[in-house]
Amino acid sequence: MKVIFLGTGTSQGVPVIGCKCKVCTSIDHRDNRLRSSIFVQYGDLNIVVDTGPDFRQQMLRARINKLDAVLFTHSHKDHTAGMDDIRSYNFLQKRDMPVYATEFTLERLKEEFSYIFAEKKYPGVPQIATNAITKEPFEVNGQRIIPIEVMHYKMPVLGFRFGDFTYITDANYISDEEKEKIKGSKVIVLNALQKKQHISHYSLSEALEVLQELNPEKAYLTHIGHFMGLHSEVSNELPENIEIAWDGLELTID
């Protein structure tokens, strides 16, 4: 399995024009983050999880020319706003793009992108094939995917397990039942917004506590805000098997 971190930031983590803080002015590429998203090559299946506002830029940067499906974690705009750019893959692949999300998220997408789902469509709009999913495992082109339901304050959000790899973003609570789905993963990606406690995201210390319980061989932190601090400095505070992910980081998972 191949994983590319397309983006590891958040709307609270992208460089701010005119901001002179040490993260926004850092020349370390690992501090320059687009909105959180990953590309997963799972068998012969190419999947993207979330299409935030930076989706087009991320796909061009990673040179991803084939996309088989899109999975959505939830309906917040920093995870969905780039869905219009799916149209490029419609053009290249001459087929509708399968999209997988909960019923709630699909309804929000239909509201936000009403022109895509209109009965009479304007020529050239993205062609989407919607697939409603729940907390139960599902398959995409024969590859099994396990949804992990987490809470983003009071909002249910999905993470996903692909074989021995689990990806979770926008969480501040995971039930014991859902943790059982994660256990045994060799690699876990978990959100950690900042060091200070937050109402809807894990803080750094909270994320480390969860990862200690789940005990993967390797873990990466994502959905990083610029209040976290510099990558090089925070990395020195982490356990040996945990790293802060960065945009463009590639993993190979056996």
Image: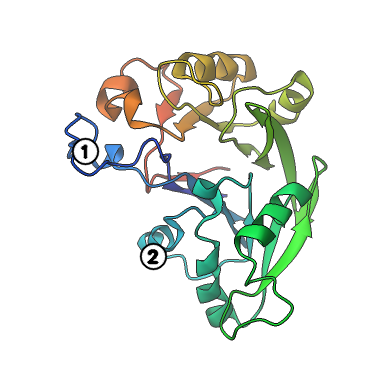
Q: Nearer the viewer, residue 232 or 239?
A: 232
Q: Give me the disc on residue 42.
A: none
**Dividing the image into 4 quarters, which one contains the C terminus?**
top right
Q: Position of residue 189 (x, y in %)?
A: 54, 33
As shown in the figure, which amino acid type bears the numbered disc 2?
Leu
Residue at x-position 30% and y-position 29%:
231
Closer-to-camera residue (125/35): 125
Q: Residue furthest bottom?
A: 123
- Residue at (57% x, 66% y) in the render: 67
Residue drawn at point x = 75 percent, y = 19 percent = 176
Number of marks drawn: 2
Q: Earlier in the sequence, mark 1 or mark 2?
A: 1
Kindly tell me whether residue 43 is visible in this rendering. no
Q: Which residue is mark 2?
A: 60
Mark 1 belongs to which amino acid?
A: Asp
Answer with left or right where residue 190 lies relative to residue 160. Answer: left
Inter-mark Cα distance, 1 to 2: 21 Å
Residue pointed to by mark 1:
28
Toward which corner of the image does residue 239 lie, by quadrant?
A: top left
